[in-house]
Image: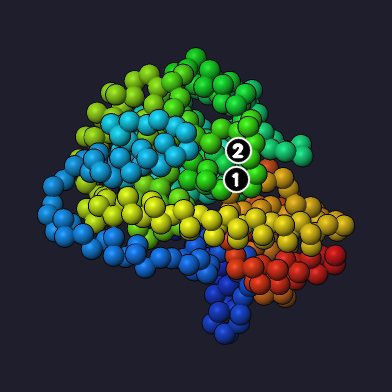
Amino acid sequence: MFSSRLKWDLPPNPLSLLIDEKRRAGGQILDLTESNPTRAGIRYDPAILSALADPAALRYDPSPLGLVGAREAVAHYYAERGVSVDPSRIVLTASTSEAYSYLFKLLTDSGDEVLIPRPSYPLYEFLAALENVNLRAYPLRYDGIWHFDLDALEAAISARTKAIVLVNPNNPTGSFLKRDEAERLQAIAARRSVAILSDEVFSDYGFADDGARVSTLAAGDATLSFSMSGLSKVAGLPQMKLGWIVASGPGHREAIERLEWIADTYLSVGTPIQLALPRIMAASRDIQRQIRERTAGNLRRLRQMASGSVAGVLSVEGGWYATLQVPSMRSEEAWATELLHEYDVLVQPGFFYDFESESFLVLSLLTEPDVFAEGVGRALACAGL
C-alpha cells in the first residue's frame, strides 16, 4: 500500500534502546551529543519574538522565491562577509533540508546520482530516498588534517551523476574547503557537467582565521553552484524554519526560474518569519558570539584533558563538533555502549557519520561546559586514561 521510498522501519539501535531504558529508570545522562542551541543554555533576546508580531503578517501576498525584504536581508548577510549576492539569486525555503529537496527536484530524475562526502551527516540517505535519488560517496582523507580526495571524487562521477554535495565546513569533521581544492573541484564539475551543492550552515563558526579557506561558493562563476544556509545555525534558531539557496555560475538564471516553479508548488515559508528576518539577522550576532565562545572553550578543554593520553582529538577547523579517536581494542559501538551503560555518558559512534575505520567518537562542542567537562572526564576514565 505504501511507497517503496519509505523503507525506514529499521529496529532501534542498541544505544537508543539503552537511552530509553536509562530514562525510564530515572537516570541522569550526560548528553555529549546535544546539537540544539535552544536546549544548550544559549541566551536569546526577547526582541526576537516581538519581531514576529509585525501586523503586515496578517496579509498574505505569496511570493514563491521569498519576500524581497527577506531576500535583501540574506544578501546583506553575505555582504557583511565580503560577498556580493543579488537578491534575485536567492530562494527562501523552510529549512536546509527543504533546500536539498528543491535542488534534487531541480537537477535529478528518478535513479540519477548525487555524490556526498564520507564522513558526513547521516540525513542524506533519507532526503535522497524521498526523491528516488541514488547516493555515491567520495572520501575525505585524514593525515593530521582533513582534505578532499579529488581524484577519488572524479572517479566516482558516472553518466548519471547530477550533483556533488559539499559540506563546508564538514559535519562532523569540521574541515573547511581550501582555495586550491575549490578551484579543482569547480574545474571537475564544469568538465563533467555536474552542479555543486554547497552546504554552508556552519560557515560562521571557524575556530581561527585562515586565508586559504573558502567559506562560501555564493560568488562563484566557474560552474553552476548552489550555496545553502539558514537560521538553524546562522542564528541558532532551528524552530524558526527558514533557510535559503543562493544560485551562482553558468545557468543560474534558468535555475532560479525553475526553482520558482518548485517553490510556488509548496509556498512553505511563513510570512511572519520573512518579515522578521532583518531583525533576527541583527540579533544573530550575539547568538553567534555565544556559540563561538562555547564551542571554542569546550574544544580547548577537550584538548587539555586528552593531552598525554592515548585518546587523540582530530584536527578540527570549525563547526559544532569534535572527533575523539580512542583505542581500537574495541568497536565504536562497544565504546559508546559502555560509556552510556557504565558511566551515563552519551556520545555518537563514528559509524553514525560513515567513518571509514574504527574507532572514533563524535562529541558536540555545543554542550554546556560543566556537562561537557564531566562527560569527557568520564569518557577518559572509561578508557583507563
What residue appears at the point 40 percent right and 30 percent down from the top-left corner?
84
First of labels 2, 1 by sequence position:
2
Which three-letter amino acid code belongs to the residue tagged 1?
Gly
What residue appears at the point 12 percent right and 54 percent down from the top-left corner?
59
* 230 with respect to 71 (left or right): right
What residue appears at the point 30 percent right and 34 percent down from the top-left corner?
87
Q: Which residue in the rendered view is the most extreme toward the right? A: 308
Circle 2: element type: loop
Q: Which residue is mark 1?
A: 206
Q: Between marks 2 and 1, how big is the CA–CA gap?
A: 9 Å
Q: Position of residue 287 (x, y in %)?
A: 48, 58
Q: Position of residue 247 (x, y in %)?
A: 37, 30
Q: What is the tally of numbered marks visible in this picture?
A: 2
In the depicted structure, whether residue 263 falls above or below residue 291: above
Q: Position of residue 15 (x, y in %)?
A: 61, 66
Disc number for residue 176: 2
Circle 1: element type: loop
What residue appears at the point 61 percent right and 80 percent down from the top-left corner?
28
Which three-letter amino acid code belongs to the residue tagged 2?
Phe
Quadrant for the C terminus in the image: bottom right
